[in-house]
Amino acid sequence: MRAGADAERSDHPNDHRPQHAEQFRDRPDGPNPFVLGRPRTERFMAVMDAMPRGRIADAETTGSRDEPRPRATGTHMCR
């Protein structure tokens, strides 16, 4: 595991940050919902490491190059 981390940080839209923030707000003296513990953080990091490797392997197998999808920002799209 990298640097003994016990929490994940992600910019992925499905990372449960809003729910964790609500839990933290509702129970400020309770356990920190952002701290996953080392085993769960190791699993998170393994998945984050495997995902781009899988995309690269797929692209090499098919000979295609995936173009990044445009991101929605406000009312217009940008690359």
Image: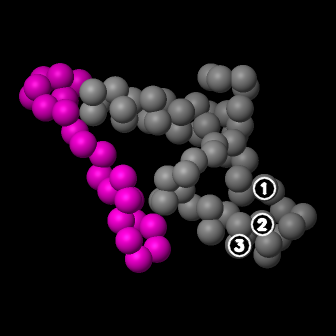
Q: Is residue 39 above or below residue 25?
A: above
Residue farthest to the left, as pictured: 62
In the rendered structure, which segment of residues is drawn in magenta?
57-79
Disc 3 marks which residue? 22
Q: Amino acid at mark 1?
A: Asn
Q: SS class of the residue under badge 3?
A: helix
**62 left or right of 75 in image:** left
Q: Residue at x 19, y 33 (%)?
A: 65
Give the CA separation, mark 2 to mark 3.
5 Å
Q: Residue at x 54, y 56 (%)?
A: 15
Query: Quarter of the image containing the N terminus?
Result: top right
**Looking at the image, is mark 2 or mark 1 earlier in the sequence?**
2
**Looking at the image, is mark 1 or mark 3 earlier in the sequence?**
3
Q: SS class of the residue under badge 1?
A: loop
Give the CA separation, mark 1 to mark 3.
11 Å
Residue 54 visible in this rendered orientation of the protein: yes
Residue 24 got which mark?
2
x and y, in percent, of residue 55 in the image: 27, 33
Labels 2 & 3 near each other (Cβ < 8 A): yes
Residue 32 got which mark?
1
Labels 2 & 1 near each other (Cβ < 8 A): yes
Q: Residue 30: which quarter of the image?
A: bottom right
